[in-house]
Amino acid sequence: MGNQETGARNVIRVLPWKTPDGKECLLQSDDAGGVLSRLADDMEAAQLGIGEKVLLHAQELLSNPRATEPEMRYLARQLAECLGDSLRVAGSRGVRLGIDGTEDDEGDAGEGPELPAEAFG
């Protein structure tokens, strides 16, 4: 069966891991059920599961008035790592769904929200 018969399409998938020097790993395939695709699916699920656990820990720690600065810094690093993983998963899935994720309603891509300095203590 060819691509047109099965509905499969040859896409480049961003894998949920990086090379030793920090570059993205890509997989070009029209076989969503291949060994690497299944491994990537399993790793994405694991990364999202870890993200959920870190979020629960963050909610607990943030509600603790006795949390220390080192604990909060460690939490911030873990949240940043999980957010990066989640964004990579979302981007990869978006590409596979045909959504490029580059739309920006206000034309200020990359600028993020502006917060007052007081928000950071």
Image (spheres, rainbow, N blue to C red):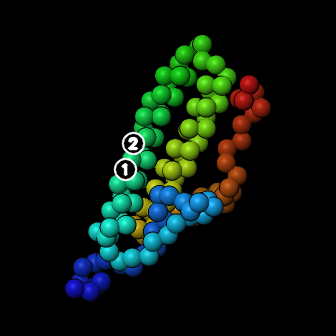
The residue pinned by badge 2 equals: 49
Q: Look at 35% across and 54% down and name the residue there.
A: 42
Give the quarter of the figure containing the C terminus.
Answer: top right
Q: Give the residue type at disc 2.
A: Gly
Q: Amino acid at mark 1?
A: Ala
Q: Quadrant of residue 69?
A: top right
How many labels, in total?
Answer: 2
Would residue 22 be visible to someone looking at this image? yes
In the depicted structure, whether residue 48 falls above or below residue 19: above
Residue at 55% in and 38% down: 79
Position of 47 with respect to 23 (left or right) is: left
Tell me if I can see residue 99 in this picture.
no
Q: Secondary structure at mark 1?
A: helix
Can you give x and y, in whole percent of width and height, for residue 118 in the image?
75, 27
Element class at badge 2? helix
How would you rate the neighbour count of disc 2 (Cα within 10 Å): few for under 14, some for 14-19, many for 20 or more? few
Return the residue nearer the eye: 113 or 29.
29
